[in-house]
Image: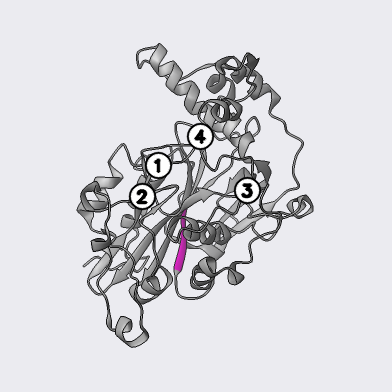
Amino acid sequence: MADPRLPLLTRRGWIPREPLPLDNIELRYSAPRADRFDAAKRLLAPYWPTAEGTAVPTYSAAVDAYVSPPLFFNAPSFRLLGLDPSVPDTSLHMTMGSYFDWYDTGEALGYEAAKRYAETGGATIAGPYRQWLADPFNFVGRCATPGVNTLTIRTSRRGAVFYLHRRTKVATARGTVHVVPAGEFQPSGGPSSGHATGGEDLDLRSTIIREYAEELLGASDVNNPTERVTPVDFMADPLNAAVASALRGGGARSHYIGTGLYPLTWKPEILTVCVFEERLFDRVFATMKRTVIEGELEGRGGRPLSEDDRLPGMLDDFLFGHKKRPYQGLPFDEETVQTYASDPTTLPAARACLALAWRHREALGIRTG
């Protein structure tokens, strides 16, 4: 672990010394490979139960048969092949994979770990599959689909606030607290020919914009390949347009703050932070939802939010007829940040985002009081 202060596995250079503008991150692409990950799936196959007397071949098939979570489908997903922190800032080498390949060869590590922990009375989480993979930074034997995790911060003369989700109806990490938005690095659609070059969604901002619309504004999921075959036109969609405008040169400050691996599943986690001045934030997120299918916004003290928690009105409300207001966030102060950054129910990627944003608060232009 190159940075022992963070709860992620990292290598030297994976966490930059200071935040980097998101535009400085190079995304290199290679055409999809023919990897089927057969060796990984064979090692894991003995763990999965039968369904109606038939052997279940993969973890995703077992979860689908026994749990059937909503929004659980095999979408095209970008796959990380490597990271180079030296050209000139950071370069991520990507190809195309699939969500179920990630689930079956990555998320399955979490299942094996829980099983081994129970079997050994907490002595170890290592099983045959983890031992076979051996090196968490070798992405050859598994599909390493990154998550894109964005800490959202609203600044004003009175200080700054940030937003977290308590995850509910999701296929992974239910009941935990995470930054909002957060989602898989995936294209929003497009024919397979577009995947030969990565397509227009080979762009971290595209994922962030899409997740903002889904997790804060209540837009429907656009990644289901059975429902969408073309990329989202962000500027044509009302729930995406304001977010897209703000993130693509419209005033929101988007920074890359590092990449690490989740220690349990070795999933790559791309860490970013978006800073909004209050007027921009309140305009873009005026119709913010406190509950969406992925989770519920976290209130102070961990309580659920109510309509009384919307931000108070401003002069603009009277001048321009605004009726809705975003919800109150959590105070971006040392006590609150450290409380969540040290809480084991906060996902490691969220804890790392909080710790790094606090470390770099001056460079990020965040006013804390």
The magenta stretch is: 253-257
Q: Position of residue 234 (x, y in %)?
A: 59, 67
The answer to whether residue 253 is left or right of residue 337 is: right
The residue that label 3 is drawn on is 224
Residue type at mark 2: give it: Glu
Mark 4 vs mark 3, foreground winner is: 3
Distance from disc 4 to disc 2, alpha carbons, whole Å, reads 26 Å
Distance from disc 4 to disc 1, alpha carbons, whole Å, reads 22 Å
The residue that label 1 is drawn on is 168
* Residue drawn at the location 48% of the way across and 28% of the way down: 110
Mark 4 vs mark 1, foreground winner is: 1
The residue that label 2 is drawn on is 296
State the SS at label 4. loop
Q: Position of residue 356 (x, y in %)?
A: 36, 53
State the SS at label 2. strand
Against 105, is 127 above or below?
Answer: above
